[in-house]
Image (spheres, rainbow, N blue to C red):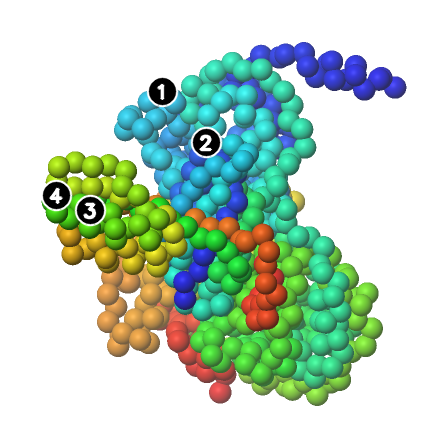
Amino acid sequence: MKASWVADEEKSKVQMMSGADMLMEALEKEGVEVLFGYPGGAVLPIYDALYKKKIRHILTRHEQGAIHAAQGFARVTGKAGVVIATSGPGATNLVTGIADAMIDSLPLVIFTGQVATTVIGTDAFQEADIVGVTMPITKHNYQVRRVEDLPGIIQEAFHIAQSGRPGPVLVDIPKDISTALGAYAAPKDVSLPGYQPTVMPNLLQVKRLADAIATAKKPVILAGAGVLFAGAEKEILSLAEQHRIPVANTLLGLGSFPSDHPLFLGMAGMHGTYAANIALYECDLLIGIGARFDDRLTGDLNHFAQKAAVAHIDIDPAEIGKNVETLIPIVGCAKHTVSALLRESTSSGDTAEWVYHLSELKSSYPLWYKKDDKTLKPQRLLEIIHEETKGEAIVTTDVGQHQMWTAQYYGFSKPNRWVTSGGLGTMGFGFPAAIGAKIGNPGLPVVAVTGDGGFQMTLQELSVLQELKLPVIIVIVNNQSLGMVRQWQEIFYEERYSQSLIPVQPDFVKLAAAYGIDGAVAGTEEEARQEFARALASNSPFLLDCRVTSDENVYPMIAPGKGIHQMIGVKP
Amino acid sequence: MRRIITATVLNQSGVLNRLTGLLTKRQFNIESITVGHSDDPGISKITIVVQVEDDRKLEQLLKQLHKQIDVLKVKDLTDMALVARELALIKVLTTPDTRSEIKVIIEPFRASIIDVSLENVTIEVTGDNDKVEALIELLRPYGIKEISRTGLTAMPRGTQRTVYNLNQFSII
């Protein structure tokens, strides 16, 4: 064994390195295998350093595509998605994706080029104050001012992005910092006195929750995306089964509990199931785990869980008590907290009647739609995709009707297969996210379910599918309208369809053909099944343009401002 | 309600921007904000006087401030025994007749005249908000030309009285 001073002496040998090379060194140290990006003037030195390295780089055709792909990658792998873009427009094109990642807690590390430090503040060519712009939509951000600071900053950036409640971290690197030579020193361990996420729960609070469970007659678990980030699916399942507690999911929490489990109530919220919403309305103990009680989930707060003691487990203390008054607050990682809870809670309340009541609701008021023989029902389309993929696929979506139908009818039973833009509700998210998801998890089929509106926002990424021959299946739920906007205009604006109908459309199959991608149109159930099966079997990129019933609405629904129990469109 | 909150922060560039941006984003109204170095040049102390609707909003504000990576410590001083001071510079119009009158007025406030010209004097006063306000009101009849106030800076007293109605926040 070497004496420690030998190691110290080795460390102190000064190695001069350019900022761009330090970045590559740091990326390798963090184990980054893939970058999503787009080059430009201010990142030329970085791309030059990348040229000599083995790190894979996915050249998307727009920076927005790069960041959504990184989000898809992060969602399915749990690792930080890494993005590079140039200064000015390159950086500002990332903004939607950064805000999306922030609100949905996705770990990203974003490197933006910046004009040289000598001209920052002079309105130089392609200068934008991206640090200022992204301050409220990043977990943290940096501008590198000294080349020697780079390795430490990058290490901190990855640490912050991936620990605690995950989120995007942006590192802005001026061009002269990338080219400057500096003494490289491998960074020591991260030390951030102002950032110490609480992972282990307070046992007193855990005991309080255990006591509440022991006496509760109508408990319900609301499992959100925090369960998936923590990898706590097994713990939640044990908790639910041990105490016979029914489970509802948030939109982003889908996949954290098996959808075919008898205790599963379905998704709660605006387009959730009747059983899940009534459970949240009537319960006497609500255990929120890694969920943030978003307004689309709770409806009018005056009617949300009013009879319940609310227990809230979250790694972010600021989420606790933010929207819903909380009796039992527990700050901690979902996995550790529920494990501790399983140890503490030995006795269960008598929930038999409650479980029976909810299962009655579940079978009497299931999700439903009117079948007809003429048109392809979008709900049926999603059921077909579930059947053909056996529920194993990674499914991505944008926002809107197709997103809700996917959440309702795909039936997610396994974690980290559901990639959607939940909080921000970004059109054009699903397709590029599918590219990142496929790269992150090449072993699973990946289906990008998108709308005819949203697909046209980021369809330039068809080039990436063509170039990489990535077997992503694009399913366009084509109703020739901006469906959710149209639905709201139908219900709340007396059918004044202002700017929501888009009957003039490109020939999507020909468009795919222009990129050398196979495609088909499906107008009936039979065609949809056949073509989807063909796409799946081909193991190559495919675009399926599904002409679905154009005036179909998403039901059931809680109208905005209404309570969670006031659902419309429940099965009669 | 009006709260006096101090935040101990790492002295990174943009940290003030971060905090004020956060307050704006979450719809809090800043009454005043002061920043200065602490005894460690790497660490600054920020005192924020802010209007908050209710306890829940206040709890949210403290947690959101605390969530910032560059924020080391957040303290709500309002209910503590504290010393709070601001400094104001007040330029008052004078004539040879009023000059000595003004001197008498400011004396009990332990304020001092720090600049004199033919038409006006500049008065420096230090104290809590009420004291500064009171002096300004007394000087107003003479004609105030300009006021510059630093905003409040504060710290808890060395000895704290026993607190009876401590606000029960779920977690800070």
In-image side of A499 versus B130 (left or right): left
Residue placed under numbered mark 2 in the picture: A143
Which residue is drawn at the image coordinates 44% and 76% (left, top)?
A300
Q: Report helix, strand or loop for mark 2.
A: strand
Nearest to the observer: residue A505 or residue A45? A45
Q: Residue B96 got which mark?
A: 4
Callout 1 crowding tier (Cα within 10 Å): few <14, some 14–19, many ≥20: few
Viewer-proximal residue, A562 or A519? A562
CB atoms at circles 3 and 4 under 8 Å apart?
A: no
Q: Are marks 3 and 2 in contact (CB under 8 Å)?
A: no
The residue singled out by tag 3 in the image is B100
Label 2 crowd (10 A; few <14 / some 14-19 / many >=20): many
Q: Nearer the viewer, mark 3 or mark 2?
A: 3
Whether residue A488 can be seen here: yes
Q: Quadrant of the N terminus of chain A?
A: top right
Label 3, label 4: how many angstroms apart (C-alpha)? 8 Å
**How far apart are labels 1 and 3 at the CA level?**
54 Å
Q: Position of residue B97 (x, y in %)?
A: 12, 47
Residues under labels 2 and 4: Cα distance?
56 Å
Residue B131, position as x, y percentages in the image:
34, 56
**Amino acid of disc 3:** Ser
Q: Nearer the viewer, mark 1 or mark 3?
A: 3
Task: Let me know if marks 2 and 4 both belong to one chain.
Answer: no
Instruction: Report in which chain the residue with disc 4 lies.
Output: B
Q: Which mark is residue A118?
A: 1
